[in-house]
Image (cartoon, rainbow, N blue to C red):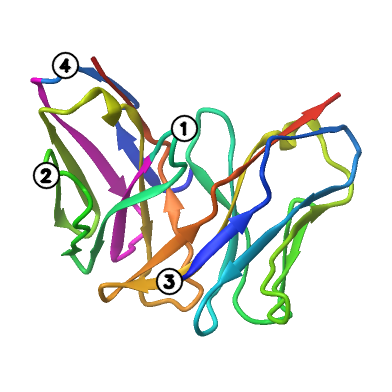
């Protein structure tokens, strides 16, 4: 148990569906992250929120929309996904101001797009 | 930009064998270095870290030394167990758009046979 939880753990959705992934951290951290993990690219950083402000990643398609309502919660809203978006989506958190800067990861959501 | 290169996997060893997983990095400045481990069906867990040159990180029998002169952070364990079977990721700290982030290597899958 790392102090970072993710729900749901598994999700199957069609290409026309809208769904959301949820992440919650209980560590008092001030930075949160979304990663995509697939066989082709092991760990792709998608979004970073630091002090609840988003750091843009222009390479992420607009069908992925993050939301960070407070420092403990992070969402990833999904709509009109493609089959190649099937992957493990990992959430992480850290204390951004620390020099040692380690991230704590949740267990991930296994997403399958049909 | 900063980057991390790990030895290609998969790596297969017998129980009680000696393990080395090579990791080299390219970075400006003096990043912190990390090894993360991902067990099947789980998220990433921090295994060990080093924050400055010549530091040695250690945990669960694993060790890695921050070598600035060779820009390396190789992971070693003297006697591996079946339970060490997992994917291992080397990473360094970086800054991006005002926020801190981790740059990961591609991961090395390790299988230990009894």
Residue A69 screen position, x and y as percent: 12, 54
Residue A106 screen position, x and y as percent: 40, 42
Q: Could you say whether the residue bearing mark 2 is in a helix, strand or loop?
A: loop
Q: In what quadrant of the picture does the C terminus of chain B appear?
A: top right
Where is mark 4, residue-wise? A14
Q: Nearer the viewer, residue B72 or B51?
A: B72
**Residue drawn at point x = 47 percent, y = 47 percent:** A2
Where is mark 3, residue-wise? B1
Residue A62: which numbered mark, if any?
Answer: 2
Sooner in the amino-acid sequence: mark 1 or mark 4: 4
Q: What is the chain letter for disc 2? A: A
**Residue drawn at point x = 51 percent, y = 85 percent:** B29
Residue A23: which numbered mark, if any?
Answer: none
**Disc 2 versus disc 3: nearer the observer:** 3
Q: Can you tell which quarter of the image residue B95 is in?
A: bottom left
User: How far apart, in angstroms, are the residues tagged by discs 1 and 4?
Assistant: 21 Å
């Amino acid at each position: 148990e790392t102090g970072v939880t993710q729900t749901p753990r598994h999700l199957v959705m069609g290409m026309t569906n809208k769904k959301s992934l949820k992440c919650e951290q209980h560590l008092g951290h001030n930075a949160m992250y979304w990663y995509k993990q697939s066989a082709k690219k092991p760990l792709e950083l998608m979004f970073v929120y630091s002090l609840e402000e988003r750091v843009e990643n222009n390479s992420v398609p607009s069908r992925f929309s993050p939301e960070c309502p407070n420092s403990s919660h992070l969402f990833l809203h999904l709509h009109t996904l493609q089959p190649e978006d099937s992957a493990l989506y990992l959430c992480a958190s850290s204390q951004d101001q620390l020099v040692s800067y380690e991230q704590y990861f949740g267990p991930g959501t296994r997403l399958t797009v049909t | 930009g900063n980057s991390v290169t790990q030895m290609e996997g998969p790596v297969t060893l017998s129980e009680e064998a000696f393990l080395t997983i090579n990791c080299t990095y390219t970075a400006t400045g003096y990043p912190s270095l990390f090894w993360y481990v991902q067990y099947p069906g789980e998220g990433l867990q921090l295994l060990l870290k080093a924050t400055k040159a010549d530091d040695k990180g250690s945990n669960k029998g694993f060790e890695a030394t921050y070598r600035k002169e060779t820009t390396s952070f190789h992971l070693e364990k003297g006697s591996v167990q079946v339970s060490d079977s997992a994917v291992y990721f080397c990473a360094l700290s970086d800054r991006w758009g005002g926020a801190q982030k981790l740059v990961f290597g591609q991961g090395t899958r390790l299988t230990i046979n009894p």
